[in-house]
Amino acid sequence: MYKQYFKQAVQLLKEKPFFSVISVLGTALAITLIMVVVLVYQVQNSNYEPEVNRGRMLFVNTLLLERSNGSSYSCLWAPRLAKECFFPLKTPEAVTLISTYKQILATNTDQTKRFKCDQVQTDEAFWKAFRFRFLAGKPFTQSDVTGNIKQAVLAETTARTLFSSAKEAIGQTVVLARKPYTVCGVVRDVSPIAQNAYAQVWIPCPASALTEVINEETMQGLSGAYHVMILARSSSDFPTIRTEINRQIQRENAGLRTWKINLLGQPDTQFTQRLRIWSNIALDVTKAIRPYLIALLIILLVPAINLSGLTSSGMQARMSELGIRKAFGATRGMLFRQVITENLVLTLLGGITGLGLSYLAIYYLKNWLFNSYDLAYTNSALSLESGMLIQPLTFFYALLLCLLLNLLSAGIPAWWASRQSIVNSLNEK
Amino acid sequence: MMIKHALKLIWTQRKKNGWILLELFLVFILLWYIVDFFVVLAGNSLTPQGTDIRNTYLVTYNMKRVDNPGYISYGEGSEEPGKNFLRMVSRIRQHPDVEAVSIGKNDYPYCPSSHYWPFQRDSFKTGCQVLTITPEYFHVFKVRPENGGSPEELRKKPFENKDEVILTKEVERKLFPQGSAIGRYIMDNDSSRYRVVAVTTDIKPHDYTRSHTFLYKPVDMANLLKQDDSGLWYSMDICIRTKAGVSARDFPERFKKEMKESLAIGNFFLTDVIPLSKIREFYLKSYGIISSLQYHIGFACFFLINIFLGVLGTFWLRVERRRSEIGLRMAVGSSRKSVLALMQTEGFCLLLLASIPALIVCINLAAMDIMPTDDMDFTSLRFLTDTLLTYLLLGVVILFSTWYPAHRSAKTEPAEALHYE
């Protein structure tokens, strides 16, 4: 039975090519747009190298220091304060400090090769929280950090530019911002889209920063350039970690004289940290998502109305045919299913086109779609990798979308058509 | 006459017109909302910025750290770091291409960081973005006093003591709604008093928003001399304006080459010369203004394409079914052009019909304060411009999308069309 509907649908397509093209285009447009949104969401929130643990990570990116007279100071973390607040936590698997990236000049020792690149300072736990592909060597260790041993990990391009190959770079001296470091490891390049882990050079956070004296006048030891990222053993630990953090912050606040720390609802999950725009206002997640949901609704609704109009106009012409079917015993339900199925063929065609277009759109518009405050200054171009885009759920979402659109656009005309009395249908011209 | 005819046609086929009317209704409202965004943008970009960043540059410098070769350790309380910094500034001033130099505490147009303090006068309160600068800043960025005079006038005002401040017009409006602020006092949260020595024209943080409240304070020179290298490096920035006629293309590289040696003073050394236009680019990108613009354009195109396809498809099908009617018209002498004109009139009538309830919704949106007013007040001019532009856009789309079906139908021979049944 469905096979017959399918054959008939293809026949209809051939009979009315122009009308079918418009329908397919209209569907493809809507699906392209929605799939772009889905793909962007995927890239920002699902796991891929090196950020393979996004699902079980928490982020404390900023810090609001408040004073009793009402003034406040929003900034990033200084290592000393972050150490006091987060290192004593017992529930997480790892806690790491990562500085914001800074463009520096990297050269080899005789200055013959130079490379302007983005540098980040971090600690040993960083390599546990993210899974990097080491082409040669290994990450720096905790003893490197505390012993102030100047080891550096380079990204592949950095190593190739300065030392001609990843393997050759190991053990060599690289001069970063006029200071010498030994290359202990080389990793595959990381796209800036993986914002949490991105850099082109990683060096240990200076040991002195972890022990500097907190001065509440000059903000030394309080305000710095670091983010805090926490790896939980599992996402079910999140509530426990939050409680632990709040207790630790309270303890720390008791020891501070002028300033009080306010986390503004942090730690964030990967999803909520992307939504946070202002560093001095608490995040209302529902409010932040609302414009996106409304936009999605509109993107679905307008083409659905469009297609409904087209379908129902197209239906007028076939009323006599449907009337004959009814006269020969077709039930309302059968007629309804027939219209829906025929429309489904058009929708699926539109869906496949739309999905293809959405991948093209993501590729060509990536600079616009993935740019944000944090990425405005990166040195390397935004690159998309297949691991980010091809995830098992993508195609499932696309199919679901097609079915939804099909129902929305053909449902009402189909229901209406199936209810027409036989005489009216037969008489309809 | 044709309009009456078109309306009659629409009425007799009202059931079939339902969908397209609904779509026009919805898209009118959505498009109106998007057009509003562009009207605000365009409207704001027409008002003066207040600062002029052409031919201005940020001169960045760095300092040697303790473990760098050639590091000079100044004792605590030494004034040498401050003096070195000022030596750098005066050498920059002596460069033949430099017209003016100003220093500030991370305060220049489009600076990524900002300081906000609350201020009050009697019962009036407002928050101000505070810029701590030297008087030459007004020359570098061509900031003018409110009466339209030259930046030189501002430079000459007393602007050295800690309590002397200069306000922008917007602050004067907020704190002194009845009169002039000059010569009067305002207070901050810690109850320190400040005397207003001048008021400038309105200044906008960027082109696409309204004027903001800015307050200028003088750099405390005595304090500057007490700072050490890091204190200076973390806070002080240097901005320059080049003389008229200096080419922007090679100036940064040339300046860096020429001044590299003379600007290596104490532990400071020159790192870069960045045109303010580049900093403005970063600012707009990082505040998401560019991407917001692109999203709005994207959505507008999306809606317009949908309407195009919808009207095209609907009229196409209608044409197919009305072949006999069209044939009849043509047989009775109606020209091809008038067939097209009738279709387009029908299309416009549909638009008009759908726009009436749509406009009611739009008026309500405006009345319920849903329309964003961060960047511009919602005036009747704004409403009118939004509405007219929306009609224009949709009208053009309908013009094009009715053209092809009408053209195709008008091509058929009358006899053939009459035969079609």
Image (cartoon, coloured by chain):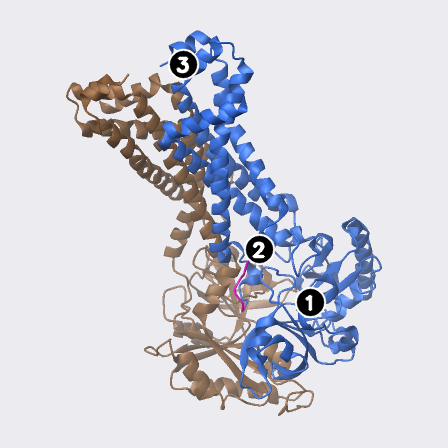
Chain colours: A blue, B brown
A10 in relation to B218, above or below: above
The numbered disc on residue A320 is: 3
Q: Which quadrant of the figure has residue A307?
A: top left
Q: Nearer the viewer, residue A394 or A80?
A: A394
Q: Nearer the viewer, residue A428 or A341?
A: A341
* Disc on the earlier residue, 2 or 3: 3
Q: Residue at x 35, y 30 (%)?
A: B351
Span highlighted in magenta in the image: A379-385
Dot in front, 1 or 3: 3
Q: Which quadrant of the figure has residue A26?
A: top left
Q: Residue furthest left?
A: B333
Report in which chain the residue with disc 3 lies.
A
- Is B46 one of the magenta-colored residues? no
* Residue type beneath disc 2: Ser
Q: Is residue B211 left or right of residue A54?
A: left
User: Mark 3 falls on what kind of element?
Assistant: helix
Name the image quarter holding the C terminus of chain A. top left
Residue at which label 1 appears: A98
The numbered disc on residue A198 is: none
C-alpha span from label 1 to label 3: 70 Å
